[in-house]
Image (cartoon, grey):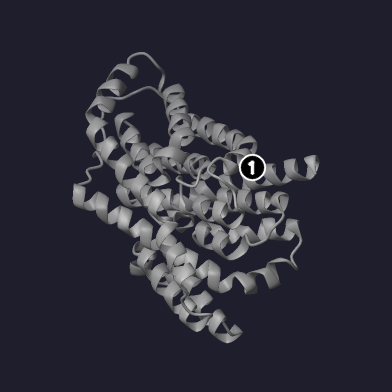
Amino acid sequence: MNHPSAAVILALLLFGPLAIAKIEHNIELYCLALGVLATLFGTGFTPELVSEALHEPVAISVAVMVAALLFGWTRRRLDRVFDRLRNQVSRPVLTAATVFAIASISSLITAIVAALVLVEVTGLLHFSRDKRVRVTVAGCFAIGLGASLTPLGEPLSTLAARALNLGFFGLFGLLAPWVFPGVLVSSIVAGAFARGEYDEAPAGAHVRQSYAAIFVQAAKVFAFIAGLVLISSAYGPIANEYVSKMSSDLLFWANTVSAALDNATLVALEVHSMAIPRAREAILALLVSGGMLIPGNLPNIVSAGALRIGSGAWAKIGVPMGLVMLGIYFAVIKLLG
Protein backbone atom coordinates (compact mmCIF):
# COMPACT_ATOMS: atom_id res chain seq x y z
CA MET A 1 0.00 0.00 0.00
CA ASN A 2 1.40 3.41 -0.93
CA HIS A 3 1.98 5.89 1.87
CA PRO A 4 -0.69 8.50 0.90
CA SER A 5 -3.45 5.87 0.84
CA ALA A 6 -2.16 4.37 4.07
CA ALA A 7 -2.19 7.79 5.74
CA VAL A 8 -5.78 8.56 4.72
CA ILE A 9 -7.14 5.19 5.85
CA LEU A 10 -5.18 5.39 9.11
CA ALA A 11 -6.57 8.87 9.83
CA LEU A 12 -10.10 7.58 9.21
CA LEU A 13 -9.45 4.61 11.50
CA LEU A 14 -8.00 6.62 14.37
CA PHE A 15 -10.08 9.78 14.29
CA GLY A 16 -13.40 8.74 12.74
CA PRO A 17 -14.72 7.31 16.06
CA LEU A 18 -13.66 10.48 17.89
CA ALA A 19 -15.32 12.82 15.42
CA ILE A 20 -18.65 11.03 14.83
CA ALA A 21 -20.61 9.45 17.69
CA LYS A 22 -22.45 7.03 15.39
CA ILE A 23 -19.09 5.59 14.29
CA GLU A 24 -17.97 5.22 17.91
CA HIS A 25 -21.12 3.23 18.67
CA ASN A 26 -20.58 1.01 15.62
CA ILE A 27 -16.80 0.85 15.70
CA GLU A 28 -16.72 -2.88 14.94
CA LEU A 29 -18.34 -2.62 11.50
CA TYR A 30 -16.41 0.56 10.77
CA CYS A 31 -13.16 -1.24 11.50
CA LEU A 32 -14.11 -4.14 9.22
CA ALA A 33 -14.96 -1.75 6.37
CA LEU A 34 -11.61 0.03 6.69
CA GLY A 35 -9.81 -3.31 6.93
CA VAL A 36 -11.32 -4.37 3.61
CA LEU A 37 -10.40 -0.99 2.09
CA ALA A 38 -6.80 -1.17 3.36
CA THR A 39 -6.42 -4.68 1.96
CA LEU A 40 -7.76 -3.65 -1.45
CA PHE A 41 -5.31 -0.73 -1.60
CA GLY A 42 -2.51 -2.99 -0.38
CA THR A 43 -1.51 -6.44 -1.49
CA GLY A 44 -5.10 -7.56 -2.00
CA PHE A 45 -6.93 -10.57 -0.63
CA THR A 46 -5.23 -13.95 -0.63
CA PRO A 47 -6.76 -17.29 0.41
CA GLU A 48 -4.41 -17.34 3.42
CA LEU A 49 -5.44 -13.86 4.59
CA VAL A 50 -9.16 -14.57 4.16
CA SER A 51 -8.78 -17.82 6.10
CA GLU A 52 -6.95 -16.03 8.91
CA ALA A 53 -9.50 -13.21 9.11
CA LEU A 54 -12.34 -15.74 9.33
CA HIS A 55 -10.59 -18.08 11.76
CA GLU A 56 -9.02 -15.65 14.27
CA PRO A 57 -12.26 -14.15 15.69
CA VAL A 58 -14.10 -17.46 16.18
CA ALA A 59 -12.90 -18.34 19.68
CA ILE A 60 -13.61 -14.99 21.33
CA SER A 61 -16.95 -14.58 19.52
CA VAL A 62 -18.13 -17.98 20.75
CA ALA A 63 -16.83 -17.16 24.23
CA VAL A 64 -18.85 -13.93 24.26
CA MET A 65 -22.06 -15.82 23.38
CA VAL A 66 -21.52 -18.66 25.86
CA ALA A 67 -20.48 -16.40 28.74
CA ALA A 68 -23.37 -14.00 28.13
CA LEU A 69 -25.86 -16.87 28.13
CA LEU A 70 -24.43 -18.30 31.35
CA PHE A 71 -24.55 -14.88 32.98
CA GLY A 72 -28.20 -14.45 31.96
CA TRP A 73 -29.15 -17.84 33.38
CA THR A 74 -27.36 -17.28 36.71
CA ARG A 75 -28.20 -13.59 37.27
CA ARG A 76 -31.03 -14.25 39.76
CA ARG A 77 -28.74 -16.47 41.82
CA LEU A 78 -26.14 -13.69 41.77
CA ASP A 79 -28.78 -11.28 43.06
CA ARG A 80 -29.61 -13.60 45.97
CA VAL A 81 -25.93 -14.08 46.85
CA PHE A 82 -25.39 -10.33 47.09
CA ASP A 83 -28.50 -9.94 49.24
CA ARG A 84 -26.82 -12.22 51.80
CA LEU A 85 -23.34 -10.72 51.45
CA ARG A 86 -24.59 -7.20 52.13
CA ASN A 87 -25.55 -8.37 55.63
CA GLN A 88 -22.14 -9.88 56.31
CA VAL A 89 -19.45 -7.83 54.55
CA SER A 90 -18.75 -4.08 54.56
CA ARG A 91 -19.38 -2.32 51.27
CA PRO A 92 -15.73 -1.28 50.58
CA VAL A 93 -14.45 -4.83 51.19
CA LEU A 94 -17.23 -6.46 49.17
CA THR A 95 -16.68 -4.00 46.32
CA ALA A 96 -12.91 -4.53 46.18
CA ALA A 97 -13.21 -8.32 46.43
CA THR A 98 -15.91 -8.47 43.74
CA VAL A 99 -14.01 -6.24 41.30
CA PHE A 100 -10.87 -8.34 41.81
CA ALA A 101 -12.82 -11.59 41.23
CA ILE A 102 -14.52 -10.29 38.07
CA ALA A 103 -11.24 -8.98 36.63
CA SER A 104 -9.38 -12.19 37.49
CA ILE A 105 -11.77 -14.32 35.44
CA SER A 106 -12.37 -11.75 32.70
CA SER A 107 -9.83 -13.40 30.40
CA LEU A 108 -12.07 -16.50 30.42
CA ILE A 109 -15.56 -14.95 30.40
CA THR A 110 -14.41 -12.12 28.05
CA ALA A 111 -14.07 -8.43 28.88
CA ILE A 112 -17.52 -7.66 27.46
CA VAL A 113 -19.34 -10.07 29.75
CA ALA A 114 -17.13 -9.02 32.69
CA ALA A 115 -18.23 -5.42 32.09
CA LEU A 116 -21.89 -6.48 32.10
CA VAL A 117 -21.35 -8.33 35.39
CA LEU A 118 -19.66 -5.23 36.83
CA VAL A 119 -22.65 -3.08 35.86
CA GLU A 120 -24.98 -5.58 37.53
CA VAL A 121 -22.90 -5.71 40.69
CA THR A 122 -22.68 -1.93 41.07
CA GLY A 123 -26.46 -1.91 41.01
CA LEU A 124 -26.69 -4.60 43.69
CA LEU A 125 -24.37 -2.63 45.98
CA HIS A 126 -26.84 0.29 46.14
CA PHE A 127 -24.44 3.09 45.20
CA SER A 128 -25.34 6.70 44.66
CA ARG A 129 -24.85 7.85 41.08
CA ASP A 130 -21.47 9.45 41.76
CA LYS A 131 -20.07 6.43 43.58
CA ARG A 132 -21.39 4.05 40.94
CA VAL A 133 -19.52 5.97 38.24
CA ARG A 134 -16.29 5.98 40.25
CA VAL A 135 -16.44 2.27 41.04
CA THR A 136 -17.28 1.44 37.43
CA VAL A 137 -14.28 3.36 36.07
CA ALA A 138 -11.90 1.68 38.53
CA GLY A 139 -13.50 -1.68 37.77
CA CYS A 140 -12.97 -1.22 34.04
CA PHE A 141 -9.26 -0.56 34.63
CA ALA A 142 -9.11 -3.90 36.47
CA ILE A 143 -11.08 -5.73 33.75
CA GLY A 144 -9.01 -4.21 30.94
CA LEU A 145 -5.86 -5.53 32.60
CA GLY A 146 -7.23 -8.91 33.63
CA ALA A 147 -8.78 -9.70 30.25
CA SER A 148 -5.36 -9.56 28.59
CA LEU A 149 -4.20 -12.89 29.99
CA THR A 150 -5.70 -15.19 27.35
CA PRO A 151 -6.64 -14.74 23.67
CA LEU A 152 -10.30 -15.15 24.68
CA GLY A 153 -10.36 -12.11 26.93
CA GLU A 154 -10.48 -9.16 24.55
CA PRO A 155 -9.51 -8.19 20.98
CA LEU A 156 -6.18 -6.75 22.19
CA SER A 157 -5.09 -10.06 23.66
CA THR A 158 -6.32 -12.01 20.62
CA LEU A 159 -4.21 -9.88 18.30
CA ALA A 160 -1.18 -9.70 20.61
CA ALA A 161 -1.04 -13.49 20.93
CA ARG A 162 -1.30 -13.79 17.15
CA ALA A 163 1.39 -11.18 16.44
CA LEU A 164 3.85 -12.66 18.95
CA ASN A 165 3.10 -16.30 18.02
CA LEU A 166 2.12 -17.16 21.58
CA GLY A 167 0.01 -20.13 22.54
CA PHE A 168 -3.14 -19.97 24.65
CA PHE A 169 -1.20 -19.53 27.91
CA GLY A 170 1.65 -17.51 26.42
CA LEU A 171 0.14 -14.16 27.36
CA PHE A 172 -0.39 -15.33 30.92
CA GLY A 173 3.31 -16.10 31.26
CA LEU A 174 4.24 -12.80 29.64
CA LEU A 175 1.87 -10.45 31.47
CA ALA A 176 0.53 -12.04 34.67
CA PRO A 177 3.33 -10.84 37.02
CA TRP A 178 2.64 -7.29 35.79
CA VAL A 179 -1.12 -7.44 35.37
CA PHE A 180 -2.22 -8.87 38.74
CA PRO A 181 -0.64 -6.06 40.81
CA GLY A 182 -2.50 -3.57 38.60
CA VAL A 183 -5.75 -5.51 39.03
CA LEU A 184 -5.23 -5.54 42.80
CA VAL A 185 -4.53 -1.80 42.97
CA SER A 186 -7.56 -1.00 40.77
CA SER A 187 -9.76 -3.19 42.97
CA ILE A 188 -8.53 -1.46 46.14
CA VAL A 189 -9.24 1.92 44.55
CA ALA A 190 -12.76 0.72 43.69
CA GLY A 191 -13.20 -0.30 47.32
CA ALA A 192 -11.99 3.11 48.48
CA PHE A 193 -14.52 4.78 46.17
CA ALA A 194 -17.23 2.64 47.81
CA ARG A 195 -16.63 3.97 51.33
CA GLY A 196 -19.74 4.31 53.44
CA GLU A 197 -22.57 2.19 54.73
CA TYR A 198 -25.21 0.47 52.63
CA ASP A 199 -28.32 2.57 52.17
CA GLU A 200 -31.87 1.60 51.39
CA ALA A 201 -31.89 3.08 47.90
CA PRO A 202 -33.18 0.65 45.28
CA ALA A 203 -30.65 -1.21 43.19
CA GLY A 204 -29.91 0.19 39.75
CA ALA A 205 -31.55 -1.20 36.65
CA HIS A 206 -30.34 -4.67 35.79
CA VAL A 207 -28.70 -5.52 32.49
CA ARG A 208 -31.15 -7.35 30.24
CA GLN A 209 -29.86 -8.99 27.07
CA SER A 210 -32.12 -10.90 24.73
CA TYR A 211 -30.78 -13.85 22.75
CA ALA A 212 -30.81 -11.67 19.66
CA ALA A 213 -28.77 -8.98 21.42
CA ILE A 214 -26.21 -11.56 22.55
CA PHE A 215 -25.86 -12.88 18.99
CA VAL A 216 -25.49 -9.35 17.60
CA GLN A 217 -22.79 -8.53 20.19
CA ALA A 218 -20.84 -11.67 19.26
CA ALA A 219 -21.19 -10.88 15.55
CA LYS A 220 -19.88 -7.35 16.13
CA VAL A 221 -16.87 -8.73 18.01
CA PHE A 222 -16.24 -11.13 15.10
CA ALA A 223 -16.35 -8.22 12.63
CA PHE A 224 -14.06 -6.10 14.81
CA ILE A 225 -11.32 -8.71 15.10
CA ALA A 226 -11.59 -9.69 11.42
CA GLY A 227 -11.16 -6.04 10.49
CA LEU A 228 -8.15 -5.67 12.78
CA VAL A 229 -6.53 -8.77 11.26
CA LEU A 230 -6.87 -7.19 7.81
CA ILE A 231 -5.50 -3.87 9.08
CA SER A 232 -2.60 -5.60 10.80
CA SER A 233 -1.69 -7.39 7.57
CA ALA A 234 -1.98 -4.25 5.43
CA TYR A 235 -0.01 -1.99 7.79
CA GLY A 236 2.52 -4.52 9.06
CA PRO A 237 5.43 -3.41 6.83
CA ILE A 238 4.75 0.29 7.43
CA ALA A 239 4.43 -0.18 11.19
CA ASN A 240 7.70 -2.09 11.30
CA GLU A 241 9.42 0.74 9.46
CA TYR A 242 8.34 3.50 11.86
CA VAL A 243 7.80 1.78 15.23
CA SER A 244 11.25 0.17 15.04
CA LYS A 245 12.79 3.67 15.03
CA MET A 246 11.18 4.59 18.38
CA SER A 247 12.88 3.82 21.67
CA SER A 248 10.98 1.61 24.12
CA ASP A 249 10.50 4.56 26.48
CA LEU A 250 9.13 6.78 23.74
CA LEU A 251 6.80 4.03 22.53
CA PHE A 252 5.55 3.47 26.10
CA TRP A 253 4.43 7.07 26.48
CA ALA A 254 3.30 7.41 22.86
CA ASN A 255 0.87 4.59 23.54
CA THR A 256 -1.08 6.82 25.91
CA VAL A 257 -3.02 7.81 22.78
CA SER A 258 -4.90 4.53 23.29
CA ALA A 259 -6.91 6.45 25.89
CA ALA A 260 -8.80 7.94 22.96
CA LEU A 261 -8.22 5.19 20.36
CA ASP A 262 -9.20 1.58 20.99
CA ASN A 263 -6.07 -0.18 22.26
CA ALA A 264 -6.71 -3.26 20.12
CA THR A 265 -6.31 -1.07 17.04
CA LEU A 266 -2.85 0.02 18.15
CA VAL A 267 -1.78 -3.54 18.94
CA ALA A 268 -2.81 -4.51 15.42
CA LEU A 269 -0.58 -1.75 14.07
CA GLU A 270 2.43 -2.05 16.39
CA VAL A 271 3.29 -5.50 17.65
CA HIS A 272 5.01 -6.98 14.62
CA SER A 273 8.32 -8.80 15.02
CA MET A 274 8.93 -7.10 18.38
CA ALA A 275 11.28 -8.51 20.98
CA ILE A 276 9.23 -9.91 23.86
CA PRO A 277 10.40 -7.40 26.55
CA ARG A 278 9.66 -4.44 24.24
CA ALA A 279 6.27 -5.90 23.31
CA ARG A 280 5.40 -6.38 26.98
CA GLU A 281 6.14 -2.72 27.78
CA ALA A 282 4.10 -1.53 24.81
CA ILE A 283 1.14 -3.76 25.71
CA LEU A 284 1.18 -2.66 29.37
CA ALA A 285 1.06 0.99 28.30
CA LEU A 286 -1.87 0.24 25.99
CA LEU A 287 -3.75 -1.70 28.67
CA VAL A 288 -3.48 1.03 31.31
CA SER A 289 -4.06 3.94 28.90
CA GLY A 290 -7.13 2.18 27.51
CA GLY A 291 -8.96 2.73 30.80
CA MET A 292 -8.56 6.51 30.83
CA LEU A 293 -11.30 7.47 28.37
CA ILE A 294 -14.44 5.71 27.14
CA PRO A 295 -13.21 4.87 23.58
CA GLY A 296 -10.01 3.27 24.87
CA ASN A 297 -11.36 -0.20 25.56
CA LEU A 298 -14.47 -2.32 24.98
CA PRO A 299 -15.35 -2.70 28.72
CA ASN A 300 -15.46 1.11 29.00
CA ILE A 301 -17.81 1.38 26.02
CA VAL A 302 -20.10 -1.37 27.33
CA SER A 303 -20.26 0.00 30.89
CA ALA A 304 -20.62 3.65 29.90
CA GLY A 305 -23.42 2.74 27.50
CA ALA A 306 -25.29 0.68 30.09
CA LEU A 307 -25.00 3.34 32.82
CA ARG A 308 -25.13 6.41 30.54
CA ILE A 309 -21.79 7.75 31.79
CA GLY A 310 -20.61 10.80 29.87
CA SER A 311 -17.11 11.32 28.53
CA GLY A 312 -16.37 14.14 30.98
CA ALA A 313 -17.46 12.17 34.04
CA TRP A 314 -15.34 9.20 32.93
CA ALA A 315 -12.26 11.34 32.21
CA LYS A 316 -12.50 13.06 35.60
CA ILE A 317 -11.74 9.70 37.26
CA GLY A 318 -9.97 7.78 34.51
CA VAL A 319 -7.29 10.26 33.44
CA PRO A 320 -5.67 10.88 36.85
CA MET A 321 -5.97 7.22 37.81
CA GLY A 322 -4.41 6.11 34.52
CA LEU A 323 -1.55 8.60 34.69
CA VAL A 324 -0.62 7.50 38.21
CA MET A 325 -0.67 3.83 37.19
CA LEU A 326 1.40 4.55 34.06
CA GLY A 327 3.97 6.39 36.17
CA ILE A 328 4.22 3.48 38.60
CA TYR A 329 4.55 0.90 35.82
CA PHE A 330 7.18 2.99 34.03
CA ALA A 331 9.20 3.44 37.24
CA VAL A 332 9.12 -0.29 37.97
CA ILE A 333 10.09 -1.15 34.39
CA LYS A 334 13.08 1.21 34.58
CA LEU A 335 14.05 -0.08 38.03
CA LEU A 336 13.97 -3.73 36.97
CA GLY A 337 15.46 -2.97 33.55
Q: Is residue 102 above or below residue 212?
A: above
Q: Nearer the viewer, residue 53 or 190?
A: 53
Q: Total label count?
A: 1
Q: Nearer the viewer, residue 200 or 68?
A: 68
Instruction: Give the image location of residue 213, x and y in percent.
Output: 23, 52
Q: Is residue 325 above or below residue 86?
A: below
Snapshot quadrant of residue 167: top right
Instruction: Give the image location of residue 120, x and y in percent.
Output: 31, 36
Asked whether, in this view, residue 254 is left or right of residue 287, the answer is: right
Name the residue rendered at 49%, 43% in the picture. 147
Residue 2 in view, yes or no: yes
Name the residue rendered at 34%, 42% in the picture. 116
Q: Secondary structure at mark 1?
A: helix
Q: Residues within 10 Å of mark 1 (few under 14, many from 20)?
A: some
Quadrant housing the C terminus: top right
Asked whether, in this view, residue 242 is left or right of residue 157, the answer is: right
Name the residue rendered at 34%, 48% in the picture. 62
Residue 309 in view, yes or no: no
Q: Is residue 39 above or below residue 247?
A: below
Instruction: Give the image location of residue 142, x and y in percent.
Output: 50, 39
Q: Nearer the viewer, residue 300 or 239?
A: 239
Quadrant housing the N terminus: bottom right
**Residue at the farthest top position:** 88
Which amino acid lies under the numbered mark 1 shown in the image of this protein? Leu
Q: Nearer the viewer, residue 164 or 306?
A: 164
Name the residue rendered at 71%, 47% in the picture. 330
Instruction: Give the image location of residue 189, x and y in percent.
Output: 53, 34
Kindly identify which residue carries mark 1.
Answer: 174
